[in-house]
């Protein structure tokens, strides 16, 4: 039985530590002591330390939004996996479509990041998903397969078992459009099958596959009731404690 996992991707919002702590405390208060759903927030780097402190001792974990795949060195402006770990992060979002698009991250580079995260004992939230044009061309599975094979290349079965996958159709991110529960389920099932061939059927059964892209309190329950949708990666709706809490609640239903 996979435990549902809902993570908030704050993107480049709420970077002021005081504001971030206010939001984090709101999330902690709403989540309370419920442990049926795993919950996490991923604030900007400037607010990570403060949010880790605000979430300490609660059911809300904290994650980074990116890392550079070297432990340390002359890489001005970058953060390493051990740095995130030392701050108290449990997770890190990798391969988000915004990073793939705006920062030209390719599968090979994302793969190095996934490996660096695992080495530092961080849980990678590995994102994949097709663009609108790719969906219209009917190549969604081909695109997602290449991203998964490339991004998770070289991981052994044990490492694969530690990864969280987030399927985020690019056309649904921040647009208010979202995949129908049936369409999303079909891609999730495809990804699980693929993970089965990379690892084993039983490991694939244990891997959480989140859906992301305009998840809101009013669509979360139907999306999350699908067999292979094991949670959500939430952008916009994670910036308000009550809407994020409502999504977590829907995941628990
Ligand atoms: P959204 O973002 O919920 O605002 O669409 C999701 C994401 O980018 O992870």
Image: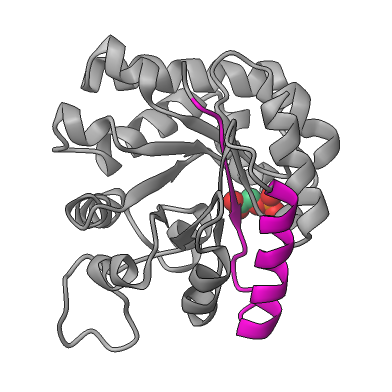
Give the image quarter of residue 80.
bottom left
Residue 240 shown in magenta? no
Q: Residue at x 23, y 49 (%)?
A: 118
Considering depth in this image, is 90 or 139 the residue closer to the camera?
90
x and y, in percent, of residue 67 in the image = 33, 67
Q: Residue at x 42, y 23 (%)?
A: 191
Rendered image coloring scheme: one colour
Judge left or right: residue 169 versus residue 149.
Answer: right
Considering depth in this image, is 118 or 140 the residue closer to the camera?
118
x and y, in percent, of residue 248 in the image = 69, 39
| In the image, residue 246 above or below residue 26 | above
| Circle count | 0
Residue lying at the far right of the rendered structure: 218
| In the image, residue 51 above or below residue 224 | below
x and y, in percent, of residue 57 in the image = 51, 58
Considering depth in this image, is 242 or 111 the residue closer to the camera?
242
Residue 7 shown in magenta? yes
| In the image, residue 3 above or below residue 22 | above
Q: Residue at x 71, y 68 (%)?
A: 23
Give the image quarter of residue 81.
bottom left
x and y, in percent, of residue 123 in the image = 34, 47
Give the image quarter of residue 64.
bottom left
Judge left or right: residue 80 versus residue 14.
Answer: left
**One can see residue 172 in this view:** yes
Considering depth in this image, is 79 or 245 the residue closer to the camera?
245
**One can see residue 175 in this view:** no
Judge left or right: residue 112 versus residue 178.
Answer: left
Which region of the structure is painted magenta?
Answer: 3-31
Query: Which image quarter holds the C terminus?
Result: top right
Q: Residue at x 61, y 83 (%)?
A: 17
| In the image, residue 5 above or below residue 92 | above
């Amino acid at each position: 039985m996979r435990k549902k996992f809902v993570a908030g991707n704050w993107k480049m919002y709420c970077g002021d530590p005081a504001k971030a702590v206010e939001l984090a405390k709101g999330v902690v208060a709403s989540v309370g002591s419920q442990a049926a759903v795993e919950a996490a927030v991923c604030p900007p780097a400037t607010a990570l330390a403060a949010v880790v402190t605000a979430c300490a001792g609660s059911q809300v974990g904290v994650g980074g939004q990116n890392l550079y795949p070297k432990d340390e060195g002359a890489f001005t402006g970058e953060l390493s996996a051990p740095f995130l770990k030392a701050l108290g992060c449990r997770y890190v979002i990798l391969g988000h479509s915004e990073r793939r698009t705006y920062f030209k991250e390719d599968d090979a580079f994302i793969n190095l990041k996934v490996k660096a995260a695992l080495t530092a004992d961080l849980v990678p939230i590995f994102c994949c998903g097709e663009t609108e044009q790719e969906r219209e061309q009917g190549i969604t599975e081909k695109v997602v397969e290449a991203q998964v094979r490339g991004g998770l290349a070289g991981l052994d079965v044990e490492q694969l078992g530690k990864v969280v996958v987030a399927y985020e159709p690019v056309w649904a991110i921040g647009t208010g459009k979202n995949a129908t529960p049936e369409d999303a389920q079909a891609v999730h099932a495809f990804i699980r099958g693929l993970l089965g061939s990379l690892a084993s059927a039983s490991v694939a059964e244990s891997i959480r596959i989140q859906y992301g892209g305009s998840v809101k309190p009013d669509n979360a329950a139907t999306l999350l009731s699908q067999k292979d949708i094991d949670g959500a990666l939430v952008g916009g709706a994670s910036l308000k404690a009550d809407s994020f809490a409502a999504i977590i609640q829907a995941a628990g239903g």
